[in-house]
Image (tube, helix red, strand yellow):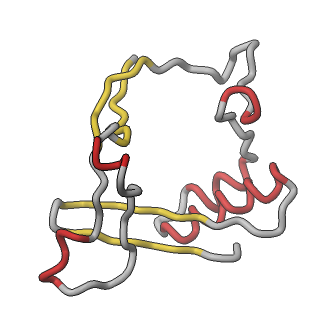
Amino acid sequence: MSAFVDYLRDAEKYATEKPYILAFDIEIEKEEQRTNLEYERKTIQTYDLRNSSNIPLIESDGFELLPISGNDMARYFSASSSEQELLGVAKLLRERFSTEFVFCYDHAVSQESDCCFFFLEGY
């Protein structure tokens, strides 16, 4: 199976300016200055790792699969609210990394002109 992934483009401008996105209200006349991010889409192969004998770990592979209990699935990930889902993600990450603080950020664009930012802090 394959999927599309949007990577940050290796643009020349990043040699002199850091990639950024402004996540606060700005004047509509300056909307084009909200970000300087450029992406490139790549097709990647995906694999089902759930029954793999080689379990990926964040330390060696850069990602890992976290087990989610049926109760947590029902409580957090069947919710219609993005806030409830992010609370579930924060809970899993706090447990996995034994930390008291997790910052979750979710960014969704439903249309090219419709940009919505949602922040949860301290969950």
- The reply, left or right, for residue 8 in relation to residue 49 is left
Compared with residue 49, is residue 75 higher up or lower down, i.e. above or below?
below
Point out the residue furthest to the right here: 98
- Residue drawn at x 72%, y 45% is 68
Quarter holding residue 111: bottom left
Percent x, y for residue 43? 32, 23
69 or 7, nearer to the observer: 7
Percent x, y for residue 36? 28, 58
Task: Please identify the quadrant where the N terminus is shown.
Answer: top left
- The reply, left or right, for residue 26 in relation to residue 112 is right
- Residue drawn at x 12%, y 82% is 29
Percent x, y for residue 77? 57, 55
- The reply, left or right, for residue 36 in relation to residue 101 is left
104 or 12, nearer to the observer: 12
Quarter holding residue 55: top right
- Residue drawn at x 24%, y 60% is 110
Task: Please identify the quadrant where the C terminus is shown.
Answer: bottom right
- Residue drawn at x 65%, y 52% is 73
Point out the residue furthest to the front here: 16
81 or 89, nearer to the observer: 89
Percent x, y for residue 94? 78, 59
Point out the residue furthest to the top here: 53
